[in-house]
C-alpha cells in the first residue's frame, strides 16, 4: 500500500511541474515576441499590455514592429469595444 501511495505522490508532483512549466513557456514566448513588436512604440506600456493580451489569446504575434498582421489572423481580427483593432 505504501508503494502505491508513493507512486501516486510522485505522479502528482510530476504533473504539477509539467503544468506549471507549460504556463511559463507561453508567458515567456509572449513576453519576448511583444518586446520586439513594441520596441519602437511611443507608448510601450500600452503596447506591451495589449500585445500580451492578444498573444495569450491567439498564441501568435506578427513579426516586426508594425504591420505583418496577416501572419496571425486571430491577432489581426481582434477588436476593441469601439470596433477598432485591439492588437498593436
Image (tube, grey):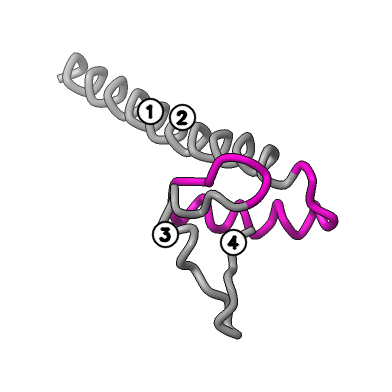
Residue range of the region highlighted in magenta in the rendering = 39-66
- 76 shown above or below 83: above
Q: Nearer the viewer, mark 4 or mark 1?
A: 4
Q: Nearer the viewer, mark 2 or mark 4?
A: 4
Cβ–Cβ under 8 Å for marks 1 and 2: yes
Q: Which residue is mark 4?
A: 87
The circle on residue 18 is: 1
Residue drawn where x is 76% and y is 42% of the image: 39
Label 3, label 1: how far apart the Cα atoms are:
27 Å
The circle on residue 21 is: 2
Query: Residue 15, located in which quarter of the rendered image?
Result: top left
Mark 2 or mark 3: which comes first in sequence? 2
Label 4, label 1: how far apart the Cα atoms are:
30 Å
Q: Nearer the viewer, mark 3 or mark 1?
A: 3
Q: Which residue is mark 3?
A: 74
Q: How far across and down, in percent of the image, does residue 34 sit?
A: 64, 44
Q: Residue furthest bottom?
A: 82
Amino acid at each position: 500500500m505504501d508503494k502505491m501511495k508513493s507512486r501516486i505522490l510522485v505522479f502528482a508532483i510530476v504533473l504539477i511541474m509539467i503544468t506549471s512549466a507549460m504556463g511559463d513557456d507561453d508567458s515567456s514566448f509572449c513576453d519576448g515576441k511583444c518586446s520586439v513588436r513594441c520596441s519602437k512604440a511611443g507608448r510601450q506600456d500600452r503596447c506591451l499590455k495589449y500585445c500580451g493580451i492578444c498573444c495569450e489569446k491567439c498564441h501568435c504575434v506578427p513579426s516586426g514592429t508594425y504591420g505583418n498582421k496577416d501572419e496571425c489572423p486571430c491577432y489581426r481580427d481582434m477588436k476593441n469595444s469601439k470596433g477598432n483593432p485591439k492588437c498593436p
